[in-house]
Image (cartoon, helix red, strand yellow):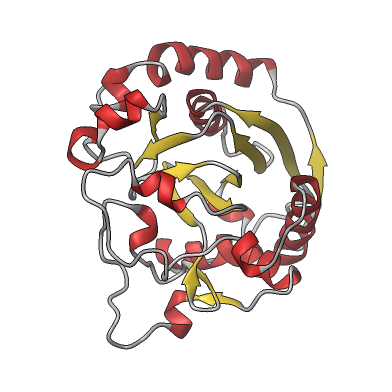
């Protein structure tokens, strides 16, 4: 493991879906083995739906309803299922494998890179644990579902037995990219209404901070999250802006990719 003295903290505030996804990819594309690892924090406004990298929009979404409701549809560079992004705190991590504690598999790296989230929820006073540690033996983990929150992976985090948020990872050469959501308010019903096929009994299987009695402003939640991140990885954070190169890359990706239905709806142009 590298002696990672600090991580860059980039807080880009609240942006639209295309802008958020363009920035995530720009930070990934701008990263090399000599770069300082990055923790980015952000939010979404207006609300948006993100599709997993390999999903077909018209198979999983009621696109007519999305357009009628003026709900933005964007595609992530990570896999997984549909996520409805509204009233949430979102993070992304970009680092080299050597900049985090050693892991023996990609799956194990999820455990390492979600450890700060487990600490975050516990620091908020919540009974949080990994799905693999507390799931019913009859329940299947890792089953693919069109809607992210309908399924559970081993290192998804449960609060009082209910899934909270979702995380996805991608490897690019010797770079690890991961992002994930922390739902603050319950917007599940709005997201499910955008699906072509709606999962049953979902409300009893997922949760958010407000439903667990945590009603705090976003700045407070960010402070708890940053402290949990530093404690978990034994590092510090140094807030920086985006570099000129990262901004130019994000703008190019926004114009050429994330404002384009060929990518967002059809997955073409990666």
Quarter of the image for the N terminus: give it. Answer: bottom right
Q: Residue 101 appears in which quarter of the rendering?
A: bottom right
Q: Residue at (72%, 35%) from the top-left corner?
A: 11
Q: Which image quadrant for residue 258?
A: top left
Q: Position of residue 202 (x, y in %)?
A: 36, 64
Between 56 and 61, the one nearer to me in the picture: 61
Residue at point 70% right, 21% down?
243
Q: Which residue occupies 60% across, 44% down?
A: 87
Above or below residue 252? Residue 86 is: below
Please tell me which residue lies in front, 244 or 166: 166
Q: With 39 as the anchor, is 171 left or right in this view?
A: left
Q: Is residue 183 above or below residue 155?
A: above
Q: Position of residue 148 (x, y in %)?
A: 37, 54
Question: Can residue 101 be seen here?
Answer: no
- On the question of residue 202 being in view, the answer is yes
Q: Quadrant of the C terminus?
A: top left
Q: Kindly indicate the quadrant of the structure image that contains residue 159.
A: bottom right
Q: Position of residue 235 (x, y in %)?
A: 78, 57
Vertical placement of residue 10 versus 244, above or below: below
Number of numbered callouts drawn = 0
For the residue pair 219 and 66, the one nearer the viewer reads as 66
* Left or right, 41 with reference to 112: right
- Point out residue 269 in the picture as x, y percentages from the top left corner: 29, 21
Query: What residue lies at 25% left-to-right and 59% top-to-bottom?
Result: 144
**Residue found farthest to the bottom:** 137
- Taking the image as shown, residue 134 lies to the left or right of residue 185, namely left
């Amino acid at each position: 493991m590298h002696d990672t003295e600090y991580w860059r903290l980039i807080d880009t505030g609240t942006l639209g879906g295309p802008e958020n996804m363009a920035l995530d990819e720009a930070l990934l594309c701008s990263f090399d083995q000599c770069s300082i690892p990055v923790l980015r924090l952000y939010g979404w406004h207006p609300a948006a739906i993100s599709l997993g990298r390999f999903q077909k929009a018209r198979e999983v979404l009621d696109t007519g309803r999305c357009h009628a409701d003026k709900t933005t549809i964007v595609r992530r560079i990570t896999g997984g299922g549909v996520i409805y992004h509204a009233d949430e705190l979102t993070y992304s991590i970009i680092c080299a494998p050597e900049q985090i504690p050693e892991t023996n598999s990609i799956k194990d790296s999820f455990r390492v890179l979600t450890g700060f989230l487990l600490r975050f929820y516990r620091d908020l006073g919540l009974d949080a644990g990994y799905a693999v540690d507390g799931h019913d033996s009859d329940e299947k983990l890792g089953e693919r579902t069109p809607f992210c929150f309908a399924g559970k992976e081993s290192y998804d985090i449960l609060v009082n037995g209910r899934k909270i948020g979702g995380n996805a990872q991608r490897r690019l050469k010797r770079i690890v990219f991961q992002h994930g959501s922390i739902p603050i308010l319950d917007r599940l019903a709005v997201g499910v209404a955008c699906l072509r096929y709606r999962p049953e009994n979902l409300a009893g299987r997922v949760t958010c901070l407000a439903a667990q009695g945590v009603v705090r402003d976003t700045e407070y939640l960010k402070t708890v999250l940053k402290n949990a991140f530093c404690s978990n990885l034994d590092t510090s954070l140094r807030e920086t802006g985006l570099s000129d190169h990262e901004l130019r890359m994000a703008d190019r990706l926004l114009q050429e990719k994330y404002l384009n239905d060929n990518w967002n709806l059809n997955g073409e142009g990666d």
